[in-house]
Image (cartoon, helix red, strand yellow):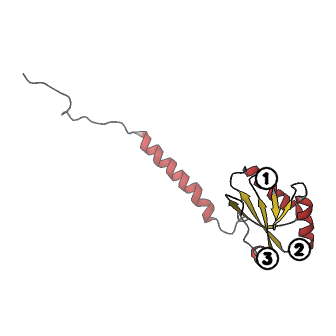
Amino acid sequence: MKRHSNRHQLRLITEISLTPLLDLVLVLLFVFMLAVPLLKTGQGKPAMPAPTPASVAAPAEKMTLLVNGDQSVTLNGAMLARTDLPASLKQLAQSRPGLGIEVRIHRDLPVQQLVETIHMLETAGIRKTAVTTHADAP
């Protein structure tokens, strides 16, 4: 007895699947949305200003601000109370205008601690900073 199956019968597809067509349209839309702003040259301001030679220049003098895991602060080897740090930084910025400070912060401290330290430096008028992390006190 022969079995009849529908597997071998040819079937005519009379409808078009819209999913690949919509995928293609969205990809093209995305590409054109990215490409059009790049093609417009000379219009508007650039996203980031080009660095000037004065802002790239190395600092005249460098100091190290060490923030340990217990949140104690050392400025060039001298221990400071955290409350005295803003006044000391302001005095340094006024006496040495080209001063650059490397902030070495313990890697286990929260990021908020780093943000507060950088804010103290900016408030004091120190613009040239670098940030590194350390595992243990040197």
Q: Residues within 10 Å of mark 1 (few under 14, many from 20)?
A: some
Q: Amino acid at mark 1?
A: Gln
Separation of disc 1 and disc 3 at Cα?
A: 34 Å
Q: Nearer the viewer, residue 51 or 91?
A: 91
Residue at x 61%, y 63% (from the top left corner): 38
Res 136 quadrant in image: bottom right
3 or 2: tag closer to the N-terminus: 3
Residue at x 25%, y 34% (from the top left corner): 11
Counting from the top left corner in percent of width and height, residue 21 is at 44, 45
Q: Residue tagged by mark 3?
A: 54
1 or 3: tag closer to the N-terminus: 3
Position of 80 compared to 34: left or right? right
Separation of disc 2 and disc 1 at Cα?
A: 26 Å
Q: Residue tagged by mark 1?
A: 71
Mark 1 residue element: loop
Position of 85 compared to 134: left or right? right
Q: Quadrant of the N terminus?
A: top left
